[in-house]
Amino acid sequence: MTEKLSDAIAGFLLARQVEGCSPSTLRSYSHYLDRFMAHVGRSTPLSSITADHIRASLAGLQARGRRNAVAGFRSLV
């Protein structure tokens, strides 16, 4: 079975919680990852996400003058 992006993100957030990330950090991660899922699609298979999807999402934020959002995405890497 192919893992969906939303499932992978839920797993990522759970792992960060177990590792001791603060609630504020988890909210921030969740916020920016929700934006990415809105751009790409929650049900998109994780295996089909490419660097181009990420670049397009970041470019869209930059075009709208969302520098803080771009920095937030980059903090996830």
Image: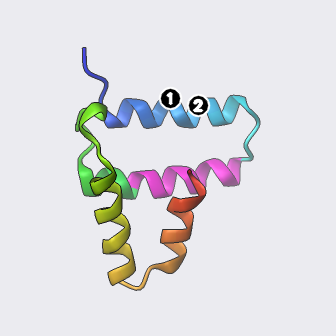
Q: Residue at x 33, y 82 (%)?
A: 63
The residue that label 2 is drawn on is: 14
Do the residues under discs 1 and 2 have CB atoms within 8 angstroms?
A: yes
Q: Is residue 67 left or right of residue 26?
A: left
Q: Is residue 29 magenta?
A: yes
Magenta segment: 23-34
Q: How far across and how far down the image is residue 6, in percent?
A: 36, 36
Q: Residue at x 44, y 79 (%)?
A: 66
* Circle number at residue 11: 1
* Circle number at residue 1: none
Q: Is residue 21 magenta?
A: no
Q: Callout 2: helix, strand or loop? A: helix
- Is residue 7 or residue 53 the one in the foreground? 53
Q: Compared with residue 57, is residue 26 higher up or lower down, i.e. above or below?
A: above
Looking at the rendering, in which quadrant would you find the N terminus? Answer: top left
Characterize the local packing of mark 2: few (<14), some (14-19) or many (20 or more) Cα atoms within 10 angstroms. Answer: some
Q: Amino acid at mark 2?
A: Leu
Q: How far across and how far down the image is residue 3, in percent?
A: 31, 24
- The image's colour scheme reads rainbow
Q: Amino acid at mark 1?
A: Gly
- Give the residue at the far top of this rendering: 1
Q: Compared with residue 77, is residue 73 higher up or lower down, i.e. above or below?
A: below
Q: Main secondary structure of the magenta part?
A: helix
Q: How far across and how far down the image is residue 24, in percent?
A: 69, 54
Q: Residue at x 74, y 47 (%)?
A: 22
Q: Is residue 53 left or right of residue 22?
A: left
- Give the residue at the far bottom of this rendering: 65
Q: How far across and how far down the image is residue 50, in percent?
A: 29, 46
